[in-house]
Image (cartoon, rainbow, N blue to C red):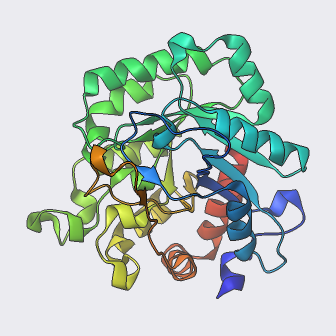
Amino acid sequence: MATQIISCHRNDSNNQAIDTHAHVFDPSLGPYASGRAYTPEDAPLEELIAFNQKLSTDSEIGTLVLVQPSPYENDCSVMMQSLRRLKDEDTCAFGIVVLDLDKTTDTELETMHYLGVRGVRLNLQADGKEVNIDKLVLALQKTSDRICHLPGWIIQLFVPGWSWDLLYQPILGLPVPVIADHLGGMLGPSKLPSSLHSSSTSQPGFESLLSLAKQSCVYVKISGLYRMSNELSSNFRDLEPIVRTFAREIPDQVIWGSDWPHTGDGKNRSKDKLKCKETFRVIDNYAIMEQLQTWMGGDVYRKMLVDNPGRLYT
């Protein structure tokens, strides 16, 4: 089974799989934000590298994309230290940051670019609050204006699936591409109203997301399946129609992310629990990857792991 997962991991950099979504949690490198929603277990860079190597039969480290996690809010110092270390070790790595652009200079952006940063994340799902579309559109425009001069930079969005209907026109006009985190927020039947159980690809936002991807405005990240489905025992098999549709309709616009170390869903989070470290989910990554390959077919699976993210992260 492992050979199926890492069949694209090779010493040749042109054949190397790219994990486009992983986090580092290391309080020894920098403190969490006081206003965070939760305190995660430790997940230092060493453990991420070990996890990545387990997905490779030759134990080579694949290309990594570190994504700023919400407990650090917009303090990216831990990520910058991690990227600098990976760069010093000649490991190919990139980063997606969360920033207060009003307090970030162009010189700071250029330094981040040198270290491998290639985009800014707008995470509207981290705190569980309702999405204010008007504010989000303004944030999209402001962010794209600040980063459009930087080669290869993107905006990464984690939003509910229905929001793509309302974001369709604003995203069409952006000068930078957008990455839709975690299946673009599209839910499996186990999380949908009963009226959509037999037609998950008819849920609000789905057609708009597909259309944006077909126009090369959006890449859809196949990641965090456990966030979009409750079917843990089947490794989230109710998401098959969604993934198969993405593979068939937008094969050149799908990318993969492990979402390591698999943070929780936030159901029982409260401020009085911040002193307690929240455990990570136990996920069968091998079974999920094997399932994805079956749903997508070998050619699209390779595009998702290698070719498509290879165009984004350079």
Taking the spot 56% from the left edge, 27% from the top edge, the residue there is: 176
Residue 99 position within the rendered picture, expressed as x and y whole percent measured from the top left: 54, 25
- The relative height of residue 183 versus residue 236 in the rendered view (above or below) is above
Tell me, yes or no, if residue 272 can be seen here: yes
> Left or right: 81 with respect to 182?
right
How many marks overall? 0
What residue occupies the far bottom of the structure in this picture?
1
Q: Measured along the vertical axis of the image, is residue 17 above or below residue 170?
A: below
In the drawing, does residue 168 fall left or right of residue 71?
left
Question: Closest to the observer: 126 or 46?
Answer: 46
**In the figure, is residue 289 to the left or right of 94?**
left
Q: Which quadrant of the rendered structure holds the N terminus?
A: bottom right
Tell me: residue 39, above or below residue 258: above
Image quarter of residue 195: bottom left
Q: Answer with left or right where residue 90 lies relative to residue 105.
A: right
Does the image show residue 314?
no
> What percent of the width, then of the height, locates residue 260?
56, 61
Q: Residue at x 51, y 39 (%)?
A: 32
Quarter of the image for residue 57 reads bottom right
Q: Position of residue 169 (x, y in %)?
A: 34, 27
Could you tell me which quadrant the C terminus lies in? top right
* Residue 7 percent location from the top left of the image: 74, 77
226 and 249: which is toward the camera: 226
Quick one: 153 or 204, which is closer to the camera?
A: 153
